[in-house]
Amino acid sequence: MLYESTRNKNISIKSGEAILKGISGDKGLFVPSEIPQIDESFLNGLAALPYSKRAEKVLSLFLTDFTEEDLRFCTQNAYTPEKFGTEAIAPLKKLGGGEYVLELFHGPTSAFKDMALQILPHFMSCAYKNTSADKKTVILTATSGDTGKAALEGFKDAENIQIIVFYPESGVSDMQKLQMATQEGGNVYVCAVKGNFDDTQTGVKNIFANDDIINGLYKKGMVFSSANSINWGRLVPQIVYYISAYCDLIKENQIKPGEKINLCVPTGNFGNILAAYYAKSMGLPVGKLICASNRNNILTDFINTGAYDIKRDFHATSSPSMDILISSNLERLLYDISGRDDSLVTELMHKLGTEKAYSIPANMLGRIRETFAAGFCSESETLSAVKDTFNKYGYLCDTHTAVAMHVYNRYKEESGDDTKTVIVSTASAYKFPGSVLEALMGEHNINGGFLQAEKLSELTKTKIPANITGLKGKKVRFSTVLKPEDMYKFVLDSI
Ligand SMILES: *Cc1c(COP(=O)(O)O)cnc(C)c1O
């Protein structure tokens, strides 16, 4: 299977090359030229297998230029019970009624980004081998908090790779900041940016598009790539866990074969929910995809009206990994929904740059609304959702997952749709102990992430993940803070 760009469908490259490049030269995103199809017998076959094998089978449908041995190597090294602390890797928990939680936060950095970033470095090293690439790769990443740490952990000390992470100075939780600032590894660089996530992401995109920097890098034998979800290698492993969750529901006799389920996903850059869309497009029996946003509710507005308008205030919330106004992966949905109309996508993305807004034609909006429902959650509703979920089910969730809980409950109430639903849990509550504690206790004056985590553990009788406790007393290695326009200097100094 070959890959094309959302802004030029005449581009045709192998998956390995798409993963190494990260983004197309025309600024478009790489997408597969067709969506492979699965059926009931494929799902039944998977249900008997462990997660890493399920991943191998699903990935082989998309990464057709990878050998079977390569994919086995990638999946077996990425998805180990040692790294994920559980045999299931992505366990599905029943809450009650027809509600289930898909826990994607058991990896080494306690956020769902590990599901992709534990395997992406292996994809890249296989792709190197297969494409006989002779350049070193510099991974440039903008993070709203969780991608940065997961990418640093995935790529630390990887051969032929350097990684540079930029995060918004006051846009991440203290725990997230500490995770990144203390990162070990000889090939890692971390820098804070004065601004929000969109400023940071735009800064990175500008460096990717700066020919002077790219040529300078090339002369030194290096090329850029991305660990953000604009990279196909980030998205494709995320398709796996939706299929895997469905297999678990079958295996546990929770659904009949072929029965449709809904998926509710807390959304920021539109990567995670786009992977769910691809899983549905492959033939996974899925009804509605419920897109949950926090106060930055641009996607709710878009799905309800077809107008995407970034001329609005940016809010820093208690679910910081979803504080995003420019959701990059929406471009892939637009491409698919428009019937792969690369000129239309190019035009819309150009409008977003110049007019800060665009609208899609009614027929496209109609198609989006057949599949997607959308809602958002205020700050107080987020905290209430943490508390209510704990009181009702004894289940501790983080603030991002709480956004999805709230949006799902309201969707169910308003639509009357009682289809069994998988709610995606994207982070451990211990990454955001201050807010979660506030949700459970009300205003508190416990300061410092570790004290908050201990109190939270005492209160809920749950365990603090070892990777969080392990941060205590670790040396801070990175403390640079720069303005967005100076980000390129940090890149030049680091390479
Ligand atoms: C990144 C992130 C999200 C948003 O995922 P997208 O793929 O960007 O939509 C939600 N929750 C957490 C905890 C995250 O780290």
Image: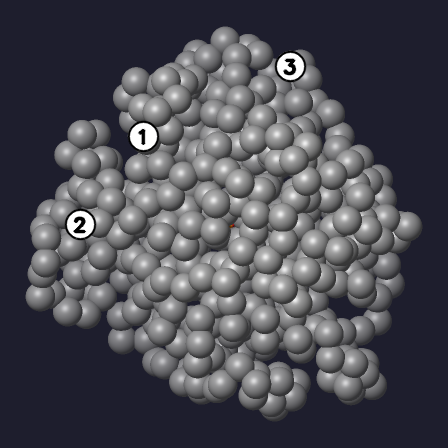
Q: Secondary structure at mark 3?
A: helix
The residue sitting at 56% across, 68% down in the picture is 201
Residue 40 is tagged as 3
Q: Is tag 1's residue or tag 3's residue first in the polypeptide sequence?
A: 3
Q: Secondary structure at mark 1?
A: helix
Amino acid found under the numbered disc labelled 1: Asn
Q: Classify 10 Å Cα crowding around label 3: few (below 14), some (14-19), many (20 and above).
A: few
Q: Of all residues shown, which one is farthest toward the top? A: 256
Q: Is residue 314 left or right of residue 385?
A: right
Q: Residue 164, how many percent across, how many down? A: 57, 75
Q: Residue 209, how many percent across, how many down? A: 73, 74
Q: Is tag 1's residue or tag 2's residue first in the polypeptide sequence?
A: 1
Q: Residue 158, how many percent across, how many down? A: 63, 67
Q: Is tag 2's residue or tag 3's residue first in the polypeptide sequence?
A: 3
Residue 220 in sight? no
| Residue where numbered disc 2 is placed | 439
Q: Classify 10 Å Cα crowding around label 2: few (below 14), some (14-19), many (20 and above).
A: many
The residue sitting at 38% across, 43% down in the picture is 376
Q: Quadrant of the N terminus?
A: top right
The residue sitting at 36% across, 52% down in the picture is 295
